[in-house]
């Protein structure tokens, strides 16, 4: 009888299996591990951000009062006494705490009010457009509801320099002087439709990056390091970190700058002529910009003041950058001096000191 033929069912050795898998297998496995790690880090980051936001709301209470304006709550912090009242307007992606040094330096001589635009700091978020006119009207309603009577000296940093100029045009009887602190310069006045769309598309990517960083809690570390470097006290650094790292703050920044840029440019242009209103314009010296071409671009920006007056002075705050010009105590003192110079011009009926 013939012998039965048997089949060898023994598994290949591990060495043989590894040879058969090839490089593609390990590339795919490596990518899978990376993806799983990224997912895990994202989940941990989002959990951290959610817990931190809840803790921040309980920890950092508003230093001023919460006032109802058109159905939503807005925060305004007024200190000191003396007329006219100084109104401090923060820049985009910013709120009242950034005025810490300037407010404390001015409150010994005047009433000083810093506030949070809707969606920033302690103020509630609202829907709809966030252009310059909307912001000016919100501020007017807030000041009336909070019983902060005119006259005012308006002090605006960055975007606040533009919106304060618009406020002065809308309510000229209320404003006695302006101080622009490293003011933003609207860029969309002469755009074509294609240029506007290119701006929207280009800056949408920056917004997307900010939202991603905010969701996973990474913004907290970036913001904390930035404001520590300016020279704010630890508590103010904590407040700025807490409220600037929220998705609400990022959304508001996008609404006030990118989405409103076209309207903001038109509105700012209409408010350009301030007549003989006392005006001091402060520009950051930006010592970090050393290349000749960068200095030339910076000095060109210094000529594009969003408002002009026959009674004005322009000054450079040497050593400062866009954030430290109000975040550093010594640089902030030059902002405070500019306010005092505007006050002196009003009282003496003389030109602003150069």
Image (tube, grey):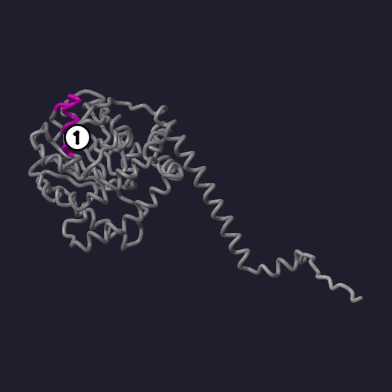
Image spot of residue 124 (x, y percent): 29, 34
At which x and y percent is residue 342?
16, 37
Corner quadrant of residue 180: top left
Bounds of the magenta segment: 136-149
Describe residue 342's horizontal placement relative to residue 213 as left or right: left
Whether residue 110 sits left or right of residue 59 in the image: it is left
The answer to whether 213 is drawn above or below residue 332 in the figure is below
Circle 1 residue: 139
Q: Is residue 143 magenta?
A: yes
Q: Is residue 123 above or below residue 285?
A: above
Secondary structure of residue under mark 1 = helix
| Mark 1 surroundings within 10 Å by alpha-carbon count, few (fewer than 14), some (14 through 19), many (20 or more) | many
Q: Who's the residue at 72% across and 66% down the image?
A: 17
Percent of width and height locating residue 1: 92, 75
Does residue 25 sit above or below 171 in this rendering?
below
Q: Between residues 28 and 210, which one lies in front from this camera angle?
A: 28
State the image coordinates of residue 162 (x, y, percent, origin top left): 20, 45
Q: Quadrant of residue 137?
A: top left
Q: Quadrant of the C terminus?
A: top left
Q: Residue at x 23, y 29 (%)?
A: 112
């Amino acid at each position: 009888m013939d012998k039965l033929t048997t089949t060898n069912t023994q598994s290949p050795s591990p060495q043989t299996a590894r040879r058969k898998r090839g490089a593609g297998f390990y590339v795919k496995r490596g990518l899978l591990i990376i993806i799983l790690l990224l997912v895990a880090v994202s989940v941990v980051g989002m959990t951290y951000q959610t817990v931190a936001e809840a803790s921040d709301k309980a920890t950092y209470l508003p230093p001023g009062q919460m006032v109802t304006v058109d159905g939503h709550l807005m925060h305004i912090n007024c200190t000191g006494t003396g007329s006219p009242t100084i109104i401090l307007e923060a820049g985009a992606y910013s709120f009242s705490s950034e005025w810490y040094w300037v407010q404390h330096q001015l409150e010994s001589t005047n009433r000083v009010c810093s506030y949070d635009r809707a969606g920033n700091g302690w103020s509630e978020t609202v829907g709809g457009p966030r252009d310059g006119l909307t912001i000016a009207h919100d501020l007017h309603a807030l000041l009336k509801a909070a019983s902060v009577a005119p006259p005012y000296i308006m002090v605006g940093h960055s975007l606040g320099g533009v919106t304060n100029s618009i406020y002065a045009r809308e309510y000229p009887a209320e404003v006695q002087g302006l101080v622009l602190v490293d003011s933003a310069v609207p860029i969309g006045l002469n755009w074509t439709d294609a240029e506007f769309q290119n701006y929207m598309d280009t800056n949408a990517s920056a917004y997307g990056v900010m939202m991603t960083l905010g969701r996973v809690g990474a913004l907290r570390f970036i913001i904390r390091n930035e404001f520590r470097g300016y020279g704010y006290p630890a508590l103010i650094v904590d407040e700025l970190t807490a409220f600037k790292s929220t998705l609400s703050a990022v959304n508001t920044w996008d609404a006030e700058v990118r989405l409103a840029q076209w309207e903001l440019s038109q509105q700012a242009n209409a408010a350009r002529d301030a007549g003989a209103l006392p005006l001091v314009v402060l520009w950051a010296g930006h010592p970090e910009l050393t290349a000749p071409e960068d200095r030339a671009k910076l000095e060109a920006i210094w000529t594009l003041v969003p408002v002009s007056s026959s009674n004005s002075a322009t000054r450079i705050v040497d050593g400062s950058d866009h954030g430290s010009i109000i975040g550093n105590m010594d640089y902030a003192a030059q902002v405070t001096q500019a306010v005092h110079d505007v006050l002196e011009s009003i009282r003496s009926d003389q030109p602003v000191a150069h």
